Image (cartoon, rainbow, N blue to C red):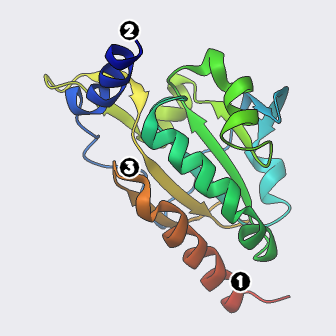
Amino acid sequence: MRLKLALAALALPLAMMPANASLPAGAKAPVFTAKGAVAGKPINVDLKAALKKGPVVLYFFPAAFTSGCNAEAHAFAEALPDFTKAGATVIGMTAGNVDQLEQFSSQYCAGKFAVAAASPEIAQGYDVLMKKPDGTAAKYTTRTSFVIAPDGKVLFVHSDPNPADHIRLTLAAVQNYRKTHKG
């Protein structure tokens, strides 16, 4: 049974195609408040409040407790000291398995950053809904990472189903922002 579940989880992204576009660099990021969790405790995640502290890495992932999403959350948790040193807040979001975010925030995010439920409005605002083979929107979000400046402008976007480069590229974008915006 576990093997069937694992194979189904791996097949999920293959059955759907990523959206053709996402909110582009230079655009104004839609602000939101969403239900989420950190360290297993429910919280409200507020992008506007997070931006007051500095740049935000907002990364969307398909679903909690799938292999790629588990690996990505763990990698963000491991790199969090580097993001913090660069003055950035990390927030993960998904439209899939949102009923499991409290457990996911403890287990794979290691209690180090917030994960939140992407409502249909948030997913549409960032243009991160996966598409079914017929082109209609699915209920899952693409693996897309944004770096958002404190003024709300999208500085960097990386959309790739493979989680491997999301951490490295968003950290580089945050560090580059810090170099050019000291003080």
Q: Residue furthest left?
A: 134
Residue topped by disc 3: 22
What residue is shown at x 26% (from left), y 27% (from top)?
A: 11
The answer to which of marks 2 and 1 sits earlier in the sequence is 2
- Mark 3 Cα-neighbour bin, 10 Å: few <14, some 14–19, many ≥20: many
Q: Is residue 91 above or below residue 79?
A: above
Q: Amino acid at mark 1?
A: Arg
Q: Is residue 77 above or below residue 110?
A: below
Q: Are marks 1 and 3 in contact (CB under 8 Å)?
A: no
Residue topped by disc 2: 1
Q: Amino acid at mark 3?
A: Ser
Q: Position of residue 157 (x, y in %)?
A: 45, 62
Q: Nearer the viewer, residue 84 or 151?
A: 84
Residue topped by disc 1: 178
Q: Is residue 81 left or right of residue 75?
A: right
Q: Nearer the viewer, residue 147 or 77?
A: 77
Q: Is residue 133 left or right of residue 8?
A: left
The answer to which of marks 1 and 3 sits earlier in the sequence is 3
Residue 68 picture quarter: top left
Q: Position of residue 44 (x, y in %)?
A: 82, 31
Element marked by disc 2: loop
Q: Nearer the viewer, residue 174 or 23?
A: 174
Q: Nearer the viewer, residue 150 or 61?
A: 61
